[in-house]
Amino acid sequence: MSAVLRAGVVGCGNVASNHAAAYRDLPGVELVACADVDPERAARFAATYGAAAVSPDALFGLGLDMVSVCTPHPTHEAVVTEAAVHGVHVLCEKPIAIDLGAAARMVAACEAAGVILGVLFQRRFWPAAQRIRAAIDDGTLGRPFLGHASVLLHRDTSYYTADAWRGTWATDGGGVLITQAVHNVDLLQWFMGEAVEVSAAHTTVKHGAVIEVEDTAVATVRFASGGLATVAASTALTPGLGTRVRVTGSTGATAGLAEYPEGSEARVDVWAVPGAEAVTSPFGSGLAADLPLSAINGSLAPFHALQIADFAAAVRDGRDPAVTGREAAKSLAILTALYASAASGRPEPVPTLKEEIPA
């Protein structure tokens, strides 16, 4: 490995800007090239970030050390496995895939090739999220037994029509659950532990003319610890009310975080710990106008940068990154069960990773 890590980006859509900017600005890393199936988009993007524009087929011949995969959800598997074949460490945007079988193949390919697979869940890098995780680890909260995640967002019709792959089961893998709420499901399972059973229902109340997937969903989740949690998610609000994740532990203490407006750094809004109680409202300044997707992504860029810095350090040090492929598959397993439950109308088990992903 060279003294300077050589990085690339595949897929030059909305979120790719956060990856490219992070690589460009990270000491000890050189952004070498950007690739996209649209050569003109790749050229414009690469020029912005001072890199070469190449075709996806040519990218892995450039001697890269690591690559970010920012392509549509169903294409993640092909790009990640190609990176593994070429010995390139790979950081994939969420969700890791749209089905657990694909995620298993991605993990297996990277492990067989000896390359590191990380998945982008930048909200874990919020100080508020890390404070709650630390309070679980040090016993302040005790064993979490009750949780809640709410994802109450606004999306215009133009969000779904801007890209042909959005809003279908085959190319998006689902709607608000897999595209937006996956972040909060990830935080919920990070706090609560292994999920074993779910019950869910979903519907489409606003965007049915342009999407075939859900824009509104509710669910309950049962955990191996005996804990329970609820999930409520929608992109049909005007204005959106942001997201929240809250957990109560066996000590009786409760901690929660709130992200408002969407894309802003979440703050601890409830810290109900005896002797250190604090509460604040995310709406203290009133309701804000809904932000365009570019502004939401831009607000999250500092936390992309933190996770990308962790991934680069993992590549350099030969260690696991903060969120491995196996870890990212846990939220996908929950989502898989949620969609199965909504289809069957009954509780469904969460697929076990040891069955889906070789040990």
Image (cartoon, helix red, strand yellow):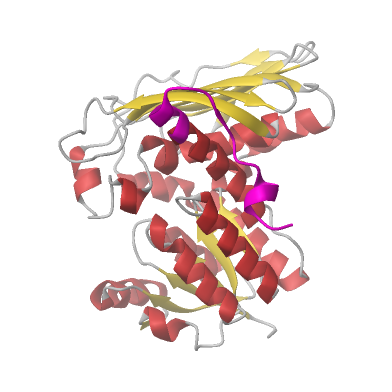
Q: Quadrant of residue 250?
A: top right
Residue 268 in percent (x, y) is at: 61, 26
Depicted 24 relative to depicted 150: above or below: below
Depicted 250 relative to depicted 340: above or below: above
Residue found at the far left of this picture: 209
From the viewer's side, name the closer residue of 211 and 344. 344
Residue pictured at 21% horizontal, 33% vertical: 207
Specify start and end residues of the magenta stretch as a single range. 340-359
| 254 to the left or right of 211 | right
Residue 219 in percent (x, y) is at: 48, 23
| 89 to the left or right of 316 | left
Name the image quarter holding the N terminus: bottom right
Count of all numbered marks drawn on residues in the image: 0
Q: Quadrant of residue 116?
A: bottom right
Depicted 326 relative to depicted 153: above or below: below
Q: Quadrant of residue 128?
A: top right
Name the image quarter holding the C terminus: bottom right
Residue pictured at 48% horizontal, 54% vertical: 97
* Residue 301 seen in this snapshot: yes
Residue found at the far right of this picture: 138
The reply to whether the magenta stretch includes residue 347 is yes
Residue 113 in percent (x, y) is at: 66, 75
Residue pictured at 19% horizontal, 44% vertical: 158
Depicted 171 relative to depicted 125: above or below: below
The reply to whether the magenta stretch includes residue 6 is no
Residue 204 in percent (x, y) is at: 27, 28
Residue pictured at 30% horizontal, 73% vertical: 37
* Residue 323 seen in this snapshot: no
